[in-house]
Amino acid sequence: MKNYKIINGVILSFRDDALVTEKKTLYIREGKISFSPFTDSEQYETVDAGHMLVMPGLINMHTHAYMTMMRNYADDVPFQEWLFNRVMPVEDNLPVEAAYWTSMLGFLEMITTGTTCFVDMHMYHRQSALAAKEAGIRAYIGRGLVGEDLFGDGYSRYKQALEEMEEFRSDTMDFILSPHAIYTCSEKLLGQTAEAAREKGMLKQIHLSESVTEVEDCLKNHGKTPVAYLYDMGFLDEKTILAHCVQMRENDMELIRESGASVVTNVASNAKLGNGIAPLCQMKDLGINVCIGTDGAASNNTLNMFREMGLLSLMHKAYARDCLAIPSDYIVKAAVLHASRALKNPAIGNIEEGSAADLVFVDLNAPSLFPNNNIVSSLCYSANGSEVDSVMINGTFVMRKHELLTIDRERVYYEIGKIVNNHL
């Protein structure tokens, strides 16, 4: 592994939750960040980051990377139609090996727009992990779990999840138990998953309170909201990641805060599917740890975190009729620092001594960012992802000067073309 000395860049980091930008030299040793100069005996390459912002890599906290082949395929239809009649039939007919290429396309988009780490929920054994390993992107991967009994009809997927963890777990890849939703998993399976997560020390994630229908059905079937349903069974805790949480009722947010669970808001997907806008202002005021995700390309329709960040702030300002609601510094923190907290990984999400060198080099001379009147605001309100010049993950460049170093773009496009022609 090469060592690097990064000079002349503007460094964005967090100190006591406050964003700080300063000119500073970084030293990358064995994939870790240091502020101590190299000794005469150390070999290194100097990287001139002049007119660059060097920032922690963005963390996409909820996605389904394999869905890229369905980009703009199931648009402008109701959520139930989108999920059950459009998306699921394609998923059922997609060959397992095709998900390697559809996932790789997702990683191509993520890397080129500044994402260095993602949290995935997938359906195709080994494919997400295999593609992530070869792309060199940091990953938290979960096989979607469904059924009545984790050790009965749900066991094949659970077994695959454990097999993937055994084969692929590394310093850049970890695994997360991922029951799909309360309407595809029984109470028994959810309880079993929570117990398995505790025994194995694993995180867990689930889609929750995404639509009005989900909430109303839960009230009808269980006499309580989805949040209360999970809370009462002991599913919610500080190692739980809740995707969406759009339709909050009664004291749902207080229960989430009390449990210590993190929320991932997916503003573009929720808006496009007509599910609403999560009450982010209230979550922020309550101190809930809120992160940002894109969801899959079938619903977003991008995996571009910069786009998500801008939409998130602007939509909540409009919804609250308050220009001070959800400021840019909160958005940037949610995209990196809050994510590292949800993942229980302090080695990512910041630029500090000993942290993993997951870095994004943003061109401050890009027309969309110039002049640099307020760098933090520009990341939220001006950046579109095209300004990303280079990306380093765990001390290794995966993109440099806009050139992808771990992914063959033309091969990915060729393979995706075949998949679309044969399966859409």
Image (cartoon, rainbow, N blue to C red):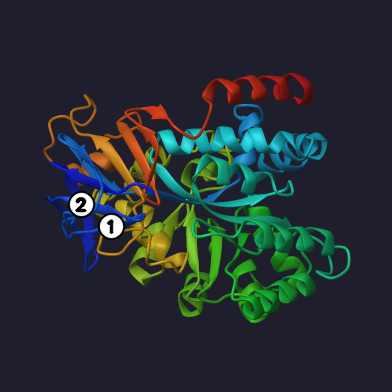
Sequence-wise, which precedes: disc 2 or disc 1?
2
Query: Circle 1 sits in a helix, a strand or a loop, which is it?
Result: strand
**Labels 2 and 1 touching (C-beta < 8 A):** yes
- On-image quarter of the C terminus: top right
Is 28 situated left or right of 166 in this image? left
Of residues 147 and 177, the one nearer the viewer is 177
The residue that appears at 71% across and 72% down in the rendered structure is: 193
Three-letter amino acid code at disc 2? Leu
Residue type at mark 1 is Ile
Q: Secondary structure at mark 2?
A: strand
Q: Which residue was labeled with disc 1?
A: 33
Give the residue at the far right of this rendering.
Answer: 152
Q: Quarter-wise, where is residue 102 in the image?
A: top right
Drawn side of residue 145 relative to residue 342, left or right: right
Q: Is residue 315 visible?
A: no
Residue 355 versus residue 259 in the image, above or below: above
Look at mark 2 in the image and give the residue it sits on.
26
Q: Is residue 112 left or right of residue 189?
A: left
Residue 253 or 414: which is nearer the viewer?
A: 414
| Residue 174: percent from left, percent from top | 56, 60
Q: Residue at x 59, y 76 (%)?
A: 201
Q: What is the CA distance from the residue labelled 2 to the residue labelled 1?
A: 7 Å
Q: Position of residue 298 (x, y in %)?
A: 62, 35
